[in-house]
Image (cartoon, rainbow, N blue to C red):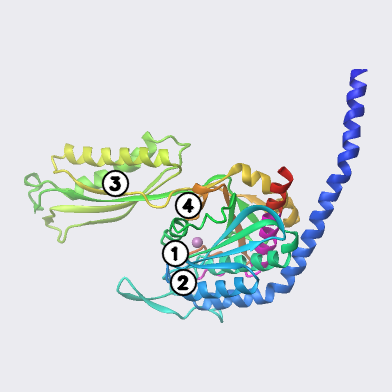
C-alpha cells in the first residue's frame, strides 16, 4: 500500500511540475528566437566593426583606438561606460529591467607584432618598430573577433534589457598578449561595483570548425613560468679542457637532466613541460668560454605543482654545477601568468544552454587541456569562470593556428558566438533568480 501512495504522490508531483517545465522550455525557445533574430539583424554591422579593428591593430596597453570604438558603441547601446580601467581597459555595465545578480563577459583587444600574410582586402598594413626592428602588426590571435563578439552580445542584451534579471558587465581588456591586461584591470577594481558572481569568455580556436564550441573543464591552460641561468665555468684553450671548467658541457648536462627530471621525478598525471628555448655560449671552436647561458619555459597546472617543479629545477642546476666543480650559477626564476581553471560546476550548469543554442549536442566538443597560457586566468582566480573555445575554421579551409601570419578566422563564428554567449549570460542570471 505504501508503494501505491508513493506512486500517487510522485505522479501528482509530475503533473504539477510538468506545465512549469514546459513553460520554462517554451520561454527559452521564445528567448532563443528573439536572440537569433537580433543577431541576424546586427551581423553586417558586426562584420564591418571587426574588419575595421582588424585593419587597425594595436599593441599591448596601446589599444586607444580600439578602446575608443568599444566605449563609443557601448554608450550607444545605452550601457554605463568606464574607460581607462587598467590603463586602457573599458567596462560596460548593462543594468537589466528586473533586479537580480551580476555576471561578467571578458573580451581582449590587443594584437601581435606579426606581418600579416592573409592577402585579405582588409589585411593590416600597420608597421611598428619592435625590439629595434620594423615589423607588421596583426590581429593574429583573433582578439579583433573577441572585441566584436563582446560588442555583439552587449547590443543583443541591451535590446532585451527589459527581460534581463540583473546586470551584465563587459570587460574589454588590453594587453593580453603580454599577460598584464587582466591583472591591471582587476587591480584597478574591475571586479567591484558591481561584482560579478561569475565571468565568461571566449577564445577563437582554429582546431574547431565554425559552429562548434569547445570546452575543457578544470585546468585548461598552463602556468607560464621560466628561468634564465648563467653557468659559470673557467675559460681556456680547447685543446686543454682539463685546465678549464667547461660551462658548455655543464649546461648541456643540465638541459638533459631537466628532461630526465620530467620523466623520472614528476607524476605523469601532473602535466609538466620544460623546454630550452635559448642556449648561448662561446665564440670560436678552440676556446672554452667562461660561461654559458640558458633560458627555458616551464609549463604546469596549479600553484603546488609550479612550486614543486621550481624546487627540483634549482636543485638539479646547482647540483650539476657543484659536481663539476663550477662556481655557484646565477639563476633568475620567474612565475609568469598562472594556469587557467575553468570552474567545472559552473561549466556543468551552463551545458544545457550551450547544447540548446548550438542545436546539436555533438557540436559541443571536449577540448584537451593545453600548455599555452591566457591571462583570463586572473579572472578565474577571483571568480568562478569559464572560457569556451569558439570554433573558427570554415570546413574545408586550410588550417592556420593562432599567431600564424596566415591566421584567418571564419567571420561566421562572430554571430554564432554572440548567439550562444547571449543565451548563456541571460540563462545564468535567470538561474540565479530561480534559486532565490
Ligand atoms: Ni589570444
Q: CA distance from mark 3 to mark 4?
A: 31 Å
Mark 1 or mark 3: name the one nearer the start of the chain.
1
Front in this rendered view, residue 75 or 365 = 75
Q: Which residues are magenta?
A: 405-426
Where is residue 126? Give x, y as percent: 44, 79
Q: Which residue is mark 4?
A: 378
Where is residue 419? Give x, y as percent: 70, 62
Evaluate whether residue 212 shows in this view: no
Question: Where is the C terminus found, in terms of image quarters?
Answer: top right
| Marks 1 & 2, CB-CB < 8 Å contact | yes
Where is residue 408? Give x, y as percent: 56, 70
* Left or right: 86, with 33 as reference point: left
Q: Which residue is mark 2?
A: 63
Report crowding for label 3: few under 14, some 14 to 19, many 20 or more residues within 10 A (C-alpha).
Answer: some
Front in this rendered view, residue 430 or 58 = 430
Question: Where is the N terminus found, in terms of image quarters?
Answer: top right
Return the mark for residue 321: none
Amino acid at each position: 500500500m505504501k508503494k501505491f501512495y508513493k506512486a500517487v504522490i510522485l505522479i501528482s508531483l509530475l503533473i504539477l511540475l510538468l506545465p512549469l517545465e514546459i513553460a520554462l522550455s517554451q520561454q527559452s525557445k521564445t528567448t532563443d528566437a528573439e536572440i537569433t533574430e537580433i543577431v541576424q539583424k546586427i551581423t553586417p554591422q558586426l562584420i564591418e566593426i571587426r574588419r575595421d579593428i582588424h585593419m587597425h591593430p594595436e599593441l599591448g596597453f596601446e589599444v586607444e583606438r580600439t578602446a575608443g570604438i568599444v566605449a563609443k558603441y557601448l554608450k550607444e547601446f545605452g550601457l554605463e561606460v568606464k574607460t581607462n580601467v587598467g590603463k586602457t581597459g573599458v567596462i560596460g555595465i548593462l543594468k537589466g529591467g528586473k533586479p537580480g545578480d551580476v555576471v561578467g563577459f571578458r573580451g581582449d583587444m590587443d594584437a601581435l607584432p606579426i606581418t600579416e600574410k592573409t592577402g585579405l582586402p582588409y589585411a593590416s598594413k600597420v608597421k611598428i618598430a619592435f625590439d629595434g626592428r620594423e615589423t607588421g602588426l596583426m590581429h593574429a590571435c583573433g582578439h579583433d573577433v573577441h572585441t566584436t563578439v563582446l560588442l555583439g552580445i552587449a547590443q543583443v542584451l541591451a535590446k532585451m534589457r527589459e527581460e534581463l534579471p540583473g546586470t551584465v558587465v563587459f570587460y574589454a581588456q588590453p594587453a593580453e598578449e603580454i599577460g598584464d591586461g587582466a591583472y591591471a584591470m582587476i587591480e584597478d577594481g574591475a571586479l567591484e561595483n558591481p561584482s560579478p558572481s561569475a565571468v565568461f569568455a571566449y577564445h577563437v580556436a582554429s582546431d574547431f570548425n565554425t559552429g562548434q564550441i569547445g570546452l575543457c573543464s578544470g585546468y585548461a591552460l598552463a602556468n607560464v613560468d621560466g628561468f634564465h641561468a648563467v653557468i659559470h665555468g673557467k675559460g681556456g684553450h680547447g685543446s686543454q679542457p682539463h685546465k678549464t671548467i667547461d660551462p658548455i658541457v655543464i649546461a648541456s648536462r643540465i638541459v638533459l637532466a631537466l628532461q630526465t627530471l620530467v620523466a623520472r621525478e614528476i607524476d605523469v598525471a601532473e602535466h609538466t613541460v620544460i623546454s630550452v628555448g635559448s642556449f648561448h655560449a662561446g665564440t670560436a671552436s678552440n676556446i672554452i668560454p667562461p660561461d654559458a647561458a640558458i633560458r627555458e619555459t616551464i609549463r604546469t597546472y596549479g600553484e603546488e605543482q609550479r612550486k614543486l617543479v621550481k624546487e627540483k629545477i634549482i636543485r638539479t642546476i646547482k647540483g650539476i654545477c657543484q659536481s663539476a666543480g663550477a662556481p655557484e650559477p646565477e639563476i633568475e626564476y620567474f612565475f609568469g601568468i598562472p594556469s587557467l581553471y575553468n570552474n567545472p560546476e559552473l561549466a556543468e550548469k551552463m551545458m544545457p544552454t550551450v547544447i540548446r543554442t548550438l542545436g546539436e549536442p555533438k557540436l559541443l566538443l571536449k577540448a584537451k587541456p593545453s600548455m599555452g597560457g591566457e591571462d583570463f586566468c586572473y579572472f578565474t582566480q577571483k571568480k568562478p569562470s569559464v572560457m569556451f573555445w569558439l570554433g573558427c575554421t570554415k570546413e574545408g579551409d586550410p588550417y592556420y593556428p593562432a599567431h600564424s601570419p596566415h591566421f584567418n578566422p571564419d567571420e561566421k563564428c562572430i554571430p554564432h558566438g554572440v548567439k550562444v554567449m547571449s543565451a548563456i549570460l541571460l540563462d545564468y542570471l535567470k538561474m540565479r533568480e530561480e534559486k532565490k
